[in-house]
Amino acid sequence: MPERVEVTISVNGRKHRRQVEPRMHLADFLRHELGLTGTHIGCEQGVCGNCTVLVDGQAVKSCLMFAAQADGQRVTTVESLAEEELHPLQQAFKDAHALQCGYCTPGFLMAAAAIAAEGRRPSREELREELSGVICRCTGYENILIAVERYLEDRGEVEAVGG
């Protein structure tokens, strides 16, 4: 097995070329190679969903994907939402009081962005199921569901993230 492999990954619209260990996870690539620490690492087993990012528009748990697997692909992280003002998705979370400790928030934001990019409006039960890949230990989920529903209702006026 080679000591290092070259990868070129477009992250938040910017191409990055790096030499990485073949078994480096995408989450570690984002955090340690690029300094994008908004992608949180929780369980490192794909259970908590805190490391969710979009890869070519699809929600992916970045602790389960090697950086080498993302070679040539488009990765969108929670940092893509950050601008002068809150992105409408972030604003929906703020307005619905869907934040507590905030550790899970990037995962929920990116999971919601993937749903929005597909252009769907899932029912409450479908939404609960689709967001079940991200675990929150603080909020009880109700306000998170409200925030995502509000964003999905209003997204016709807003360009979807990662789409």
Image: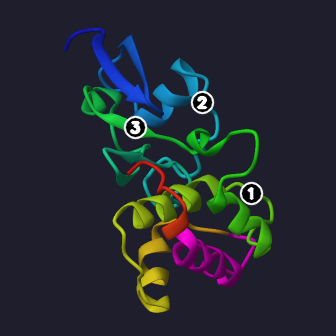
Q: Are marks 1 and 2 in contact (CB under 8 Å)?
A: no
Magenta residues, start to end: 137-155
Percent coordinates x, y for residue 142 in the rendering? 67, 84
Q: Is residue 89 above or below residue 61?
A: below
* Left or right of 73, for residue 76: right
Give the residue at x 60% y 30%: 36
Give the residue at x 34% y 40%: 65
Kind of residue at badge 1? Gly
Q: Are marks 2 and 3 in contact (CB under 8 Å)?
A: no
The residue carrying mark 2 is: 36
Name the element at disc 2: loop
The residue carrying mark 1 is: 102
Percent coordinates x, y for residue 37 in the rendering? 64, 34
The residue carrying mark 3 is: 75
Q: CA distance from mark 1 to mark 2?
A: 16 Å
From this viewpoint, is residue 82 visible?
yes
Give the residue at x 44% y 52%: 45
From this viewpoint, is residue 24 visible?
no
**Upstream in sequence: badge 2 or badge 3:** 2
Residue 145 inside the magenta-drawn segment: yes
